Amino acid sequence: MVTYDPYRAHMSETKYKTVARSFVEEIFNERKTEAAKNFLTPDIAYHGMAEEVKGLEDFKKWVAEDLSAFPDMKITVVDEFGEENKLAIKWTLKATHEKDFADFPATHKKFEAQGVEILYFEGDKIKEAWTICDLSVLSLS
């Protein structure tokens, strides 16, 4: 019989929060795409705002494309909560839309968007992620 251990659950959530914040900071804000291997499983399934990414190498290419479209991108984690091997983070993204992205032509204007990321962990690494964000802000900027 498996019993719920609130201390162990709290420690896992704390660990996942640390991993998630470091992931956002290093990969997106510091642009250290090679560090992705420290945070993601090799078979990561990343369901992005405009695309599906499978595998670590494709994830790094996808991030490079996003950073090209939004070269001054800064993501701030504003809230997070989780249980078991799941963590949800709410974030704010600020950037300038310098190149075409998805179906949105570059506007060369600054914008701000909010989003939610739902992360599934395997051990200490993210195995799957879902991003929810309203991309219509790109057409308004």
Image (cartoon, rainbow, N blue to C red):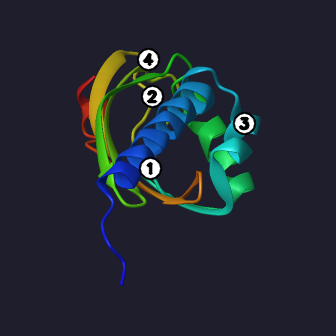
Q: In the image shown, does 111 or 92 lie closer to the viewer?
A: 92
State how far apart marks 3 and 4 are (Cα): 29 Å
Q: Secondary structure at mark 4?
A: loop
Res 68 visible: no
Q: Look at the numbered discs 4 and 2 and tell me whether their residues touch, using CB distance below 8 Å.
A: yes
Mark 1 — residue? 12
Mark 2 — residue? 106
Q: Secondary structure at mark 2?
A: loop
Question: Left or right: 114 with respect to 44?
Answer: left
Q: In the image shown, does 3 or 38 lie closer to the viewer?
A: 3
User: Relative to 23, does residue 7 appear above or below in the rendering?
Assistant: below
Mark 3 — residue? 35
User: Relative to 90, does residue 93 appear above or below in the rendering?
Assistant: above
Mark 4 — residue? 108
State how far apart marks 2 and 1 are (Cα): 41 Å
Image location of residue 29, percent across then percent down: 55, 22
State how far apart marks 4 and 2 are (Cα): 6 Å
Image location of residue 70, percent across then percent down: 51, 25
Question: Left or right: 105 with respect to 45?
Answer: left
The amino acid type of the residue labelled 4 equals His
Q: Look at the numbered discs 3 and 1 and tell me whether their residues touch, using CB distance below 8 Å.
A: no
Instruction: Using the rendered view, name the quadrant where residue 127 is placed.
Output: bottom right
The amino acid type of the residue labelled 2 equals Ala
Q: Nearer the viewer, mark 3 or mark 4?
A: 3
Q: Residue at x 36, y 54 (%)?
A: 9
